């Protein structure tokens, strides 16, 4: 397995739209293993392939307390969204920034598993929020885009300053 570098906002590669995975093969299973290792090490509760500069529809999520509940979603499609909720979100591509975002409370998502079999899950709470956040990544959208232009400019300036200090 390998740790993968995570792209940081405002890198334009984060705005690319991911393509569907044509076949779930060993190459995809290796990508998933590397993404899971990268997510756990960060640490984070989710990671989309877009964030590691791979523009395929692959997501890993583990929103469990014990870190023993890995979900792998290939070619995910949110078929149903119900209710609304508002909670603080973070993003491994926007380090150190946590902001409130409004999302659907429950989602039904269809996807392929690591064997290429179609699966459906109904999710709520943090898992549902994380699925929406990661599917947004695959569509080239970041959680900061739900915020005002002023907040987005402040976040860009903060990250640019941090990058200058650490360079
Ligand atoms: O996609 C990502 O950048 C991962 C992101 C997922 C996410 C977090 C919160 C709400 C929605 C989606 C993160 O994992 S940010 C880090 C984080 O939330 C966390 C880190 C350590 C322990 C617990 C949570
Ligand atoms: Zn993110």
Image (cartoon, rainbow, N blue to C red):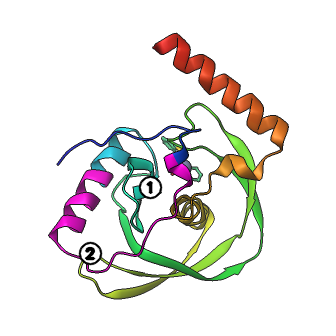
Pick out the residue farthest to the top. Answer: 165
From what the image shows, is residue 98 above or below residue 13? above
Question: Mark 1 sits on what residue?
Answer: 50
Report whether residue 48 is seen. no
Residue 154 in the image, given as x and y percentages of width and height = 76, 29
* Residue in view at x 57 percent, y 18 percent: 162
Q: Nearer the viewer, residue 10 or 6?
A: 10
Label 1 packing within 10 angstroms: few (<14), some (14-19), many (20+): many
Residue 81 in the image, given as x and y percentages of width and height = 68, 79
Among the two numbered marks 1 and 2 on one chain, the one whose residue lies closer to the N terminus: 1
Report whether residue 156 is seen. yes
Residue range in magenta is: 13-35
Residue 140 in the image, given as x and y percentages of width and height = 57, 58
- Label number found at residue 114: 2
* Residue in view at x 33 percent, y 39 percent: 41
Query: Is residue 10 magenta-colored?
Result: no
User: CB of residue at label 2: within 8 Å of ligand 1?
Assistant: no
Query: Is residue 14 magenta-colored?
Result: yes
* Residue in view at x 66 percent, y 51 percent: 143
Q: Pick the quarter of the image with the C terminus.
A: top left
From what the image shows, is residue 52 above or below residue 151? below
**With 68 as the anchor, is 131 left or right in this view?**
right
From what the image shows, is residue 54 above or below residue 139? above
């Amino acid at each position: 397995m390998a740790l993968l570098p995570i792209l940081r906002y405002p890198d334009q590669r984060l705005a690319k739209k991911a393509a569907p995975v044509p076949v779930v093969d060993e190459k995809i299973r290796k990508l998933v293993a590397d993404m899971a290792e990268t997510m756990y090490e960060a640490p984070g509760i989710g990671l989309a392939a877009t964030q590691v500069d791979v523009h395929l529809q692959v997501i890993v999520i583990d929103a469990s307390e014990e870190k023993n509940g890995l979900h792998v979603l290939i070619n995910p499609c949110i078929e149903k969204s119900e209710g609304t909720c508002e909670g603080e979100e973070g993003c491994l591509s926007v380090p150190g920034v946590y902001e409130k975002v409004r999302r659907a409370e429950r989602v039904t998502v269809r996807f392929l598993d690591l064997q290429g079999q179609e699966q459906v899950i109904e999710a709520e709470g943090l898992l549902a929020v994380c699925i929406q956040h990661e599917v947004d990544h695959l569509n080239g959208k970041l959680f900061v885009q739900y915020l005002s232009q002023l907040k987005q400019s402040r976040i860009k300036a903060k990250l640019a300053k941090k990058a200058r200090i650490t360079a």
